[in-house]
Every structure is written in C-alpha cells, then in structure tokens.
Amino acid sequence: MLTSVELNALRLSLQIALVAVIASLPFAVAVAWLLARRTFVGKTLLDAIVFLPLVLPPVVIGYFLLVLLGTKGPIGGWLYETFGVRLIFTRWGAAVAAAVMSFPLMVRSIRLALEAVDRGLEFAARTLGASRFDVFFSVTLPLMLPGIVTGSIVAFATALGDFGATITFVGNVEGETQTLSLAIYSLTQTPDGDAAALRLVVISLVLALGALFVSEMLARRVRRMLGRA
Amino acid sequence: MLARALFAACVLLMSSFTAPPAARAQEITVFAAASLQNALEEIGTVYKQRTGHNAKYSFAASSALARQIEQGAPAAVFASADEQWMDYLQQRKLIVDATRKQLLGNSLVLVVPAGSKAQVDLKPGFDFATVLGSDGRWVTGDPGNVPVGRYAQEALTSLGAWDFAQTRLVRAENVRVALAFVERGEAAAGIVYSTDAALTQKVRVAGTFPASSHKPVTYPFAVVAQHDDPTAREFLAFLEKDEAKAIFRKYGFVVH
C-alpha cells in the first residue's frame, strides 16, 4: 500500500504539525490578548511582525530562521553551546518553521474570537468577586473557545502544508524533516516517481479536507454548547 | 488622488509585461546544471558581445530541468551533469540526437567548512564517522535524482561508507544548495564538484574521490527538439570554440 518512505513522511507531517500548534497555542493566545485588549507603544509594530509570515515569501522566512536559529546563528548558536540543542536538520526545527508560518492565522482567529466576547459578562463576574485571573479562565477563555479551536485547526492544516520555510531552514532529511510536501517535491523530480507522488498528493488532500471538516464540526458543537449555557 | 496614482503605477508596471523582445537581438533559453552557473554566465556575456544574442539561463538540478523540459518548458538548449538525465530526454525524443555532445568533465570532492581541520584519505574503508563527529550531518544533492547525489552515493558505496553515510544525509535540491550549507558551517561535510569548491573560501577540500569509485562526471549538451533553430545550434557551436573552452578551463572543468 504505502512504502516506508511514504509512511515516514505522513507520520512526520502529522507529528510536526501537532507539536507546532500545541507549542504556539499559549503564545498565540497571549499575543491575541495583547493586540485585542491593550494599547502600548509599538503595538502596530507587533501587529506587523506577527503577520509578516503571511506576506513574506516562505523562503525568506526560512532564510531568517536559518540565519538566526542555525548552529552558527546568534540564538541557535547559544542553544547549541548551552544545551546541546540543535534545530537545523531536525524535526524540532521543522516544527519551529511550521509554527512560525501558521502563527499569524492562529492569532487572527483567536483575536477575532476575543474581540467578540461580551465584556459586560466579564465586568459582571468581577463585581461578583472574581479575580482577573479567575475571570479569564472561567468566563473569557470558554467564550473564546470556538475561535481557538478554529484557529488551531487552520494552523494545523497550514503547518502540514509548509514547504518553503521548512526546506530552506531544516533541509530535506528523510525520517527527520521530510514531510509530505518535501517528499512530494523529491518524488516529482525522480524518474518514475509520479505514481508515488500522486499517492502522497491524495493523502495531503484528504488530510486538509478532513482538518477543515473537523474544524467546522467542532466549532459548531462548541457554539451549541455555549448557546445552551 | 491616491487611487489615481496607484492606478497609474499599475498601468506603468504592466506595460512591459507583454512587450515583444527587441527585433534584432535574439534570445535563447538555456537550461543548465547548477554547477555550470558561473562558467556559463561568463560565457553568456562573451556570447552577447560576439553575436549580439542574449542567453537566458535557468540553473537548477539536472533532474528538475529535465522534468520541466518533459512538461514543455521553453528551453532551446539543455546541459545535464550526467548522462542519465540526457538519456531520459533522448528516450522520450525530446532532444535533437545529432546535436548531443559531451563537452566537459569534473571531479567529485568531499568538502568541510573552512574552519574544520578534517583531512581524509578517500579509499575503501575510510572513516566517515570521525569527519562528521557524533551528531554531524553531511549534505549533497538528493541521491534519488540529482546527479551529484547519484555520483556521491556511487562513490561512497564503492568505498564501503554508504550504509553509515545514509543515516546522516541531508538531501539538497542541487549541488549549490549543498555547498551553501557547508559554507555556513551547518553541515559538517558535503560532497560537491571540485569546480564548486574552488568558487568559495568558506569551504575546504578534505579529499578527492578516486575516479574509479564512480561513473565519470560528464556534461552532455544538446538542442531541445521543440526549439531547434539556428540560434540554438549557433550557441552550442559557440561553446566548442576556444574562447568558451578557455573559460570552462578557468573554472576548473575538464574540457573534452
């Protein structure tokens, strides 16, 4: 059915996308909260930087990551010397690349959900004695949930499909960074690789459609739950 | 006001989009292996001076280029870094067989970042693990399709190091991307052509693969069947002139 190379690529894609989304979720919520609720010097700059991966060519993002996080880069070098952690040529680096590329979409979804939350409910909770911390976790967060769910799943699908940033930063290492996109790219250059490439293309399509379908279902279910509450 | 200015800017930008090329100067599109970039660009400048025609290049892995030509890419001349990709096109009747010529040769080297002290004698049983260290990786073109990767796999297999090497391999799209990873010091080693290593101070040649360990590195050139015209044939003929040969030699290619 599927060769070991193809299974590796599939498994790796799913793992890397999952790690990317889970790791960036808390940051996305924090940044979305900052952008939605606070005004400060440099807010427009933060907004622009967060959305840069959406407008810059992916290869440029990959290049920035290479220069900053490679073992000879300022941050990557420090990571390597202090903790022996290497990001380039590893699945962790691939997760970082995927996370950076999908971050803007996650933030945008969460920010919209946050802005739609009725602040009256939050104030009511405060007058009833809840701390700010309590209000966030028991009122705001649950109301934001549909946005967080949709944002996460869209980010997951984006992370699954990343190519330019991944191949420029962590290269094509079979079993370590060769995700579905990279595997398809290699196969299309190989003579007689078309059949295998087609199999992987179909799998990618199924995954992407599945992710969007699940996202819609989950969002609907959460909205129903909140409607009743 | 702003809207009008933007509109004018767009019109100006797009006005050259479909403009026909200048009548007298002819353009010829050449698809060539990545390792030929520097030599061919210099030859292109001389070609323009001598004939007034413009050579437009697309440099990439021979595999990528061959697949593009197969899909109908408008190349007039194709230069591959191995015989297999030229055979691939010949079997599909996509090149003019009579124009196929083997013009150049090259040699395969193991390079390391300039700061590294590694030196290795490339003979059967050589210790690749020491060169790479405990967690280092080496890079070359994808052995599944890129010529330099195929030569590398062949050479390492005949020297008995492929089984180990395969576990540490990073596959690059072409030989120049592989070279760049070694230049940055991110890869502990790389296998590229000697002509590529000669272009940069940031890598050092740690050893040269014996010619007997791999198929000879040869560069076949041919005119693409779909775009067979006098300019294409003229360009190919120009590459065999002494002037062009001197430039190839300058970059370290073996001229046949």
Image (tube, rainbow, N blue to C red):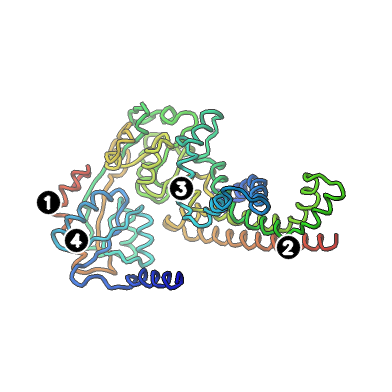
Total numbered circles: 4
- Residue B37 horizontal side relative to residue B1, left or right: left
**Dot 2 alpha-carbon crowd within 10 angstroms: few under 14, some 14 to 19, many 20 or more:** few
> What residue is at 35 percent from the left and 53 percent from the top?
B60
- Check if mark 1 and mark 2 are on a common chain: no
Q: Which residue is mark 4?
A: B235
> What residue is at 48 percent from the left and 40 percent from the top?
A68
Between the residue at mark 3 and the residue at mark 4, the CA separation in whole angstroms equals: 34 Å
Residue A43 at x, y = what percent? 59, 50
Residue A217's label in the rendered image is: 2
Residue B240 at x, y = what percent? 16, 54
Residue A179 at x, y = what percent? 54, 50
The reply to whether discs 1 and 3 touch (Cβ–Cβ < 8 Å) is no
**Helix, strand or loop at mark 1:** helix
Between the residue at mark 2 and the residue at mark 4, the CA separation in whole angstroms equals: 61 Å
Between the residue at mark 1 and the residue at mark 3, the CA separation in whole angstroms equals: 39 Å
**Dot 4 alpha-carbon crowd within 10 angstroms: few under 14, some 14 to 19, many 20 or more:** many
Q: Chain of mark 2?
A: A
**Helix, strand or loop at mark 4:** helix
Q: Which residue is mark 1?
A: B242
Q: Which residue is mark 3?
A: A168
**Dot 3 alpha-carbon crowd within 10 angstroms: few under 14, some 14 to 19, many 20 or more:** many
The amino acid type of the residue labelled 2 equals Met
- Residue A123 horizontal side relative to residue B183, left or right: right
Q: Chain of mark 1?
A: B
Looking at the rendered image, the disc whose residue lies closer to the viewer, 3 or 4, is: 3
The reply to whether discs 3 and 4 touch (Cβ–Cβ < 8 Å) is no
**Helix, strand or loop at mark 3:** helix
Residue B67 at x, y = what percent? 38, 60
Q: Nearer the viewer, residue A16 or A141?
A: A141
Q: Nearer the viewer, residue A163 or A6?
A: A163
Q: Is residue B19 above or below residue A67?
A: below
